[in-house]
Image (tube, coloured by chain):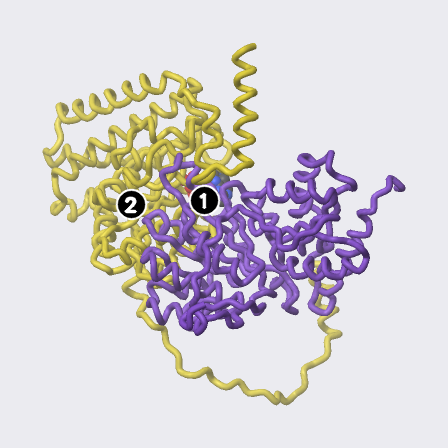
Chain colours: A yellow, B purple
Amino acid sequence: MEEVDSLQQRSSTVQEPPATVAYRPIPPPAWKPRTDPGPLLPDAEPFRVLGTDAVASADPELLRRLYAELVRGRRYNAQATALTKQGRLAVYPSTTGQEACEVAAALALEERDWLFPSYRDTLAAVARGLDPVQALTLLRGDWHTGYDPREYRIAPLSTPLATQLPHAVGLAHAARLKGDDVVALAMVGDGGTSEGDFHEALNFAAVWQAPVVFLVQNNGFAISVPLAKQTAAPSLAHKAVGYGMPGRLVDGNDAAAVHQVLAEAVARARRGGGPTLVEAVTYRIDAHTNADDATRYRGDGEVETWRAHDPILILERELTERGLLDDEGKREAAEAAETMAAALRERMNADPVLDPMDLFAHVYAEQTAQLREQAAQLRAELDAESEA
Amino acid sequence: MTTKTAARAAKPATMAQALQRAMRDAMAEDPTVHIMGEDVGTLGGVFRVTDGLAKEFGEDRCTDTPLAEAGILGTAVGMAMYGLRPVVEMQFDAFAYPAFEQLISHVSRMRNRTRGALPMPLVVRVPYGGGIGGVEHHSDSSEAYYMATPGLHVVTPATVEDAYGLLRAAIASDDPVVFLEPKRLYWSKADWSPEAPTAVEPIGKAVVRRRGRSATLITYGPSLPVCLEAAEAARAEGWDLEVVDLRSLVPFDDETVCASVRRTGRAVVVHESTGFGGPGGEIAARVTERCFHHLEAPVLRVAGFDIPYPPPMLERHHLPGVDRVLDAVARLQWEAQS
Ligand SMILES: Cc1ncc(C[n+]2csc(CCOP(=O)(O)OP(=O)(O)O)c2C)c(N)n1
């Protein structure tokens, strides 16, 4: 109150503007938007397939494949988290609850396409066919990228948020310049959409009409910060309109829906139709990583609501109801997942053997004189160590 | 000399023209070379360094990008991943800063983090340094930031011939090169024919620009002409100065530098960039570590003041000029008097 009073007092001492205004605004030259934003706008509700009429036209084979991959993915998340407890992994950002997005992203791509994962998307890389142990190299503390990105067409897992998005645009653009019908799919979290690189990537993609699909996994949180503190946009998919590309909003726990939306976007990009921004609404069931305490920023009730909308649960129900999955099928999927987990456990049981001299490899194509000197120093230290 | 070569004989050409021809020749030879940046197409760049390239090679090869430095460099990373060789222009030194994230987090370490699988054969061209009366944010010398990032080559030509030879080498390099173009030398001329064959200079080799016996001036880029002038002026005082042009800050040519200092026994490092935390500290330390017993005096530095780049009306007081270099040379008469 006091503050308001003093403000009023001050404003009363301000001089009145002159009665006549010399300047009259001239209207701007005729201008109208270049595109009707209507077709670019996302639907009001996240697109769904499971439990709707749309499911009738879904390919049963695809649904079954998605199911098996989800089950495997869930097991993979559990196994990787267990490996952190055994000290076999330095850290693991789980995608439990988000498997539908991870799996659909991988399956929406052709072999020649590229995937640009964020640090959370190891599962997408594994679902694309990357050896699970190689996919975990970064998180294990072994060398940063445990695979040849060109071999799998999977870019290195990117830790600085959103910085991999412009790479996807550049690669897709380069492919198109070369005449290859290659599409890049880039993944980012809801928090990552606030980064400048997100904006720059989307803008470049739209201006260049690059064959790129951006998949935002809106899992509710950036570590502890909820979406409401991240953006004031109606939805993250709405952001697409400002760039001149379509935004699609999809139920991120509905594997069939995510797959359909991504496959359509990929096909459109391949046809030369330009980029799409897809927001998949999902939820992170586990904490941010094994090192995070999620109880500090969210209640159990919220998690339980989302458990009822679990991607495996809703697909399993749909498949069972439609007679596409029986107990035998479920057991098969579970067994395949168990086999994968056992192999992963087994293979992660040994410490990786690293050569310290590798520190100086691959800094430059050719070692500089400075690095040769430093390598000689380390060599001598290692020799002395082994003698002692 | 045949009449044909006589017809092509050297006529004054500028550094900007030499850089432009380097890009043109590289683009003609290698279809994977792409130029990209703000205003590089129709306009030919604000310094006209890319003049005519869009017309000659098409807008897909010389592309006006949206105005976003991180986006320019970030998309260049993806292009390099797909086998292209992007040559990125940053409009001015201080406008490269938004792209530092990409440069440091990805460009510089992509080869390393992928164990050699994904090299980054791209060039980031940065017009840098002062002396052109530029307003704020148009005169920074940012080389120390680049030098501090392993995985980058940092190259800076000081002559018209080197502008051509080093840029060709930078574009051919399988590693990322930050190519610092001393903007006040863009219009410096040399008798260089834009048609005559010019050598591609290997990155990482310094050259002795002037032979001398009594002290070495170690310098690069915009400060080279200053040092050469100072060396001439110093003759009157009885100093016979050697001038080493580094040309490449990373990798650093310890050999050429130290060979010179061992001959002369004294050294002054000269650059525009700030002294504190600047390249001169690193260079002086390297020289001291390697040539201590040959030194008759401490290695001195003549640098810009440790201030944000000053306004144009005061920049001449900030930039190391001939007098400041000569003062330092005089201080090399080291008699433990201090
Ligand atoms: C540029 C940058 N800033 C900060 C961080 C630290 N950090 C790692 S994950 C994270 C939250 C990311 O949230 P979101 O984008 O929603 O992805 P999610 O973790 O939910 O998958 C933060 C702040 C980072 N990795 N990169």
SS class, disc 1: helix
Give the residue displayed 46% in from the left and 48% down from the top. B176
Give the residue displayed 65% in from the left and 55% down from the top. B210
Q: Is residue A234 above or below residue B187?
A: above
Residue B207: image x %, image y %? 58, 50
Q: Mark 2 lies on which chain?
A: A
Residue B70: image x %, image y %? 47, 54
On residue B292, which mark appears?
none
Viewer-nearest residue: A164 or A112: A112
SS class, disc 2: strand
Viewer-nearest residue: B210 or A4: B210
The residue that disc 1 covers is B106
In the displayed orientation, state which residue is furthest to the right. Answer: B337
- Dot 1, how many residues are within 10 Å of its Cα: few (below 14), some (14-19), or many (20+)? many
Look at label 2 and name its amino acid: Trp
The residue that disc 2 covers is A114
Res A221 visible: no
